[in-house]
Amino acid sequence: MEYLHQAQERFKRQNGSSDHELPRSGRNFMSQTSVIVYSSTRTISLPDRETRAYPLITGSEEGEFVDAYKMLRARVIRRFSEKGWNVLGVSSPTAHEGKTLTAVNLSLALALDLAHTVLLVDADLRHPDVHRAFGLGQAQGLTEYLFDAAPLAQLLIHPGVGRLVFLPGGRAIKNSAEALASPKMAALAQELKHRYPSRLIVFDLPPILSRPDVLGVSPYIDALLLVAEEGRTSSADVEQALAVIGGSVPILGGVLNKSGRKQLTTRRAMDLFQTDVS
């Protein structure tokens, strides 16, 4: 955990904060448990397991796969409650390491907890994929909101699970970094962050090393969760990703995807990651 710890310490020194400070301690997002009826938000049904693009914890038999996400949920809730946070970014050093799988299943796990609502935002605008996890074809989403003035209420989708709503990425665009750093995105992020005190927000972000998008989004998120894949992600990738972040956002921790199938490139990289979601 040496490099994650160093990243957190750099952030604290730059911002004058400590582990015991709660920047929004007055917000208790664990306090509201009212039943929600999605009357205007579009509701869909999850496809059968055989037709899903991703393995989801909903509908899966209880076991290590489901338990891992429940454990991750517990750790996220505990840390967010301690710090007064409510916005989590999920990313990875490079592509195809399981960040979208982690973002979707963590959001599902959080939404099955009745203490709060969850909004999952697909912010990987060059390669939006969250909609496929829920069995949808191309769907309008964040891109259409930012560029086409599509009303947000018409873009949100309830997948029929718990207290979860997601915002698809929409059509793929090349100027994703500029879109995510735009004033309209900043205003949207603030609106999502502060409108409902009991809501947790999860951003599925682009890979850190492929383009500068995550740095543009970092002002909007409270903490970042890193995802690596055993046998694919190298320790150099992890170290470089943390260097790019440079303490701009606290690193909540990491998820090691597909662990146990192959030995990771180096043991040092594997030691960075605490939660096993295989």
Image (spheres, rainbow, N blue to C red):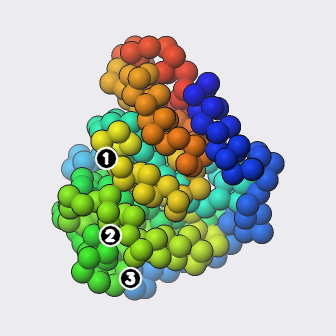
Toward the viewer: 255 or 48? 255
* Residue 186 against residue 77 in the figure, above or below: below
For the C terminus, the quadrant is: top left
Disc 1 residue crowd, few under 14, some 14–19, many 20+, Cα 10 Å: few
Q: Which mark is residue 156?
A: none
Name the amino acid, label 2.
Leu
Q: Is 266 located above or below residue 242 in the figure?
A: above
- Residue at label 3? 153
Mark sitting earlier along the chain (2/3): 2
In the image, is 70 to the left or to the right of 259? right
Residue at image position (36%, 59%) is: 123
Cα gap from disc 1 to disc 2, whole angstroms: 18 Å
Task: Report, in whole angstroms, how far the alpha carbon at label 2 lies from the one at label 3.
Answer: 11 Å
Hey, what amino acid is under mark 1? Arg
Give the left or right position of residue 101, taking residue 75 as reference. Answer: left
**Residue situated in front as seen by the camera: 69 or 161:** 69
Dot 1 and dot 2 residues touching (CB under 8 Å):
no
The quadrant in which the N terminus is found is top right
Mark 1 lies on residue? 211
x, y percentage for residue 184? 40, 76
Q: Amino acid at mark 3?
A: Ala
Q: Position of residue 219 (x, y in %)?
A: 53, 60
Q: Nearer the viewer's eye, disc 1 or disc 2? A: 1
Q: Is the residue marked by circle 2 packed among few (<14), some (14-19), or many (20+) residues within 10 Å?
A: many
Say which element carries label 2: helix
Are dots 2 and 3 in contact, CB under 8 Å?
no
Examine the rendering and report whether any part of residue 273 can be seen. yes
Q: What is the C-alpha distance between the residues marked 3 and 1?
A: 29 Å
Q: Nearer the viewer, mark 3 or mark 1?
A: 1
- Taking the image as drawn, is residue 230 in sight? no
The residue lying at 79 percent from left, 53 percent from top is 21
